[in-house]
Image: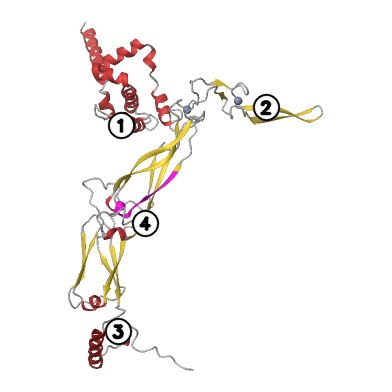
Amino acid sequence: MLHRGAALLLLLLCIASVVLAARDYYAVLGIGKQASDKEIKSAYRKLSKKYHPDKNPGDETAKDKFVEVSDAYEALIDPEQRSIYDRYGHEGLKQHQTNKGAGGGRHHDPFDLFASFFGGGGHYGHQPGVRMGPDVNVRVGISLRDFYNGATTEFRWEKQHICEACEGTGSADGVVETCPHCHGHGIRLIKKQIAPGMFQQLQTTCDACGGRGKAIRHKCPACRGERVVRKATTVTLKVDRGAARDAQLVYENEADESPDWVAGNLVVTLSEKDPDNDNDNPDRVDGVFFRRRGDDLFWTELLSLREAWMGDWSRNLTHMDGHVVRLGRPRGEVVQPNHVETVVGEGMPKWHQDNDSPYHEMEFGNLYVQYVVVLPDQMEAGMEKDFWSMWQKWRKQVGVDLHQDSGRPEKPPVRDEL
Ligand SMILES: [Zn+2]
Ligand SMILES: [Zn+2]
């Protein structure tokens, strides 16, 4: 008796947990009640890939989540179902679906939904017999400033999508028949007479259906029966601080879609754009003209003869995040032409996997400043005279021994003459 009671209680608890397991659809997708269709789609796109059983082998929780995400998506993307759900919740929606009979047009199979979203058979490419579409490579130019500060930007490319109008069937009325010419095989055998009474059998692709084995009477007007359409697609791109100039980012299964394959990867290769002072430099910082090599930055600074020789000058270099690097010399400190000064820690941020973590301390490369000394082409006559007489006065008294200053050995090596 006691056992039966315990069993009943257990059963009740199970039912309770099943009811509890039906989580709020908005929470499942991590979106707000006012989310647009675009946000719903984007949430589904992200989460369905994350929890796809192919990516989480043996993980039952992930599989449940995958199903949950597709249920939530289907309920919220349909305006009628969404409004019922908003008003009456899970129970109301379930009743509505039962009333409509056989699922009310729902996909039922979360893999079918996944396939209609990403193309292919609803699985990732590692199953035998599933074709992978080709990878697509895109190069995106990023300004040095965005490499330095990190940036979230967008780029557009012409992506092949499964036609939404016909859901990838190519047919205007949804009717797809077996090709009557090849009986669905996609190939035809042609008998060719090569000599009287002698025939050769040739195999060719069925020209009526283009090898697909299917025939469409009324072609979809949107894709002209091609089942796919190309249209500009915007992709969000996150550039990490200090990302390498030619870093690659892989968007799994986001290359061209086709009903015939699982979409391949979209591979984005970054490259550094030339500095564009008009468009990329609203704050007029000098840093956009830095040159980058690895984690280090390079800059050329011009000095006048007076500055190089006499000192007493300063420069404020605005770095790419707006902070100022101060260069300068006090009076009497000489800078030799082409001297390279190392400013430690003012180079690029060093990319690190944990860059975003508050516990990770950002390290930086160096900034190398090369000084170029510019001599005046012309002088006012009076100034020229003054300088000339000053030189005349001093050259006799303290001449510079160029040989000693050159750093060459004191005496040429003595060689025995035979
Ligand atoms: Zn179409
Ligand atoms: Zn055919």
- Determine whether the residue tagged by mark 3 lies in a helix, strand or loop: helix
- Determine whether the residue tagged by mark 1 lies in a helix, strand or loop: helix
Residue at which label 1 appears: 39
Crowd tier of the residue under label 4, counting other residues whose Cα lies within 10 Å: few below 14, some 14–19, many 20 or above? few
Q: At label 4, which amino acid type do we have?
A: Asp
Residue 315 x, y percent position in the rendering: 22, 67
Residue at which label 4 appears: 274
Front disc: 2 or 3? 2
Q: Is the C-beta separation of discs 2 and 3 under 8 Å?
A: no
Disc 1/disc 3 C-alpha distance (Å): 72 Å
Q: Is the C-beta separation of discs 4 and 3 under 8 Å?
A: no
**Residue interval drawn in magenta:** 137-148
Residue at which label 2 appears: 189
Residue at which label 3 appears: 405
- Determine whether the residue tagged by mark 2 lies in a helix, strand or loop: strand
Earlier in the chain: of badge 4 and badge 3, it is 4
Earlier in the chain: of badge 4 and badge 2, it is 2
- Determine whether the residue tagged by mark 4 lies in a helix, strand or loop: loop
